[in-house]
Image (cartoon, rainbow, N blue to C red):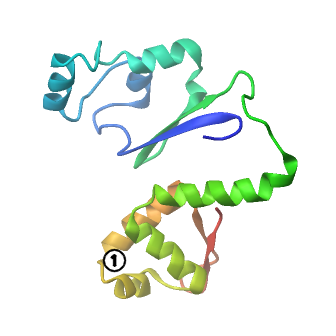
Amino acid sequence: MYSDRVEITSAGGLPQELSQEEFLEGVTAPRNKELIRVFKDVDLIENIGSGVLRILDAYDKSCFKFMNHFLRVSFKYKENPFEYDQETTQETTLKTTQENYTILNETQQNIIKLIKNQPSITQKEIAKELNITRDGVKYNMNVLKELGIVVREGSTKKGNWKILK
């Protein structure tokens, strides 16, 4: 939750066979059909695939952000329901950043710690330090980049990692 919006981030992105256009038109491609059947049987869902269209009745398409590994929807408030104190901006930003880190997995949090201690660390060094594969490091670094948490500055050999959030 932010002072001007609520954001929901869903891991996994769109199913591979579904385009952004199809998604925004309400086409569904359930990942777990059995789970949907159970939810429907116990009346926890009313109409499969109606959520996106209901969102688009109230908001425009720009509320959705599509990423390779995530889908984020951002609902802006019509009015700001929160008191906003300019003096607490830095404190709020720090708290929000710490809360954002809680959505990261343990590997991603450990990568951030390593980068803070040594911005010039390589993915090979991260893999060795965390005892994971280079592919595992690459995947988690891509997640951190897509979330806008880290960025690489300079060349791959002589550059540094920078933590943005």
State the residue at coordinates (35%, 87%).
Answer: 128
Residue 29: which quarter of the image?
Answer: top left
Asked if residue 158 shows in the view, the reply is yes
State the residue at coordinates (37%, 15%).
Answer: 50
State the residue at coordinates (47%, 69%).
Answer: 109
Residue 119: which quarter of the image?
Answer: bottom right
State the residue at coordinates (27%, 20%).
Answer: 44
User: Quick check: 98 left or right of 55?
Assistant: right
Residue 5: which quarter of the image?
Answer: top right
Q: Which residue is mark 1?
A: 134
Seen in the picture, residue 25 relative to 98 is either above or below; the reply is above
Q: Position of residue 16 (x, y in %)?
A: 29, 39
Q: Nearer the viewer, residue 155 or 10?
A: 10
State the residue lying farthest toward the left: 34
User: Quick check: 31 left or right of 89?
Assistant: left
User: Quick check: 132 left or right of 38?
Assistant: right
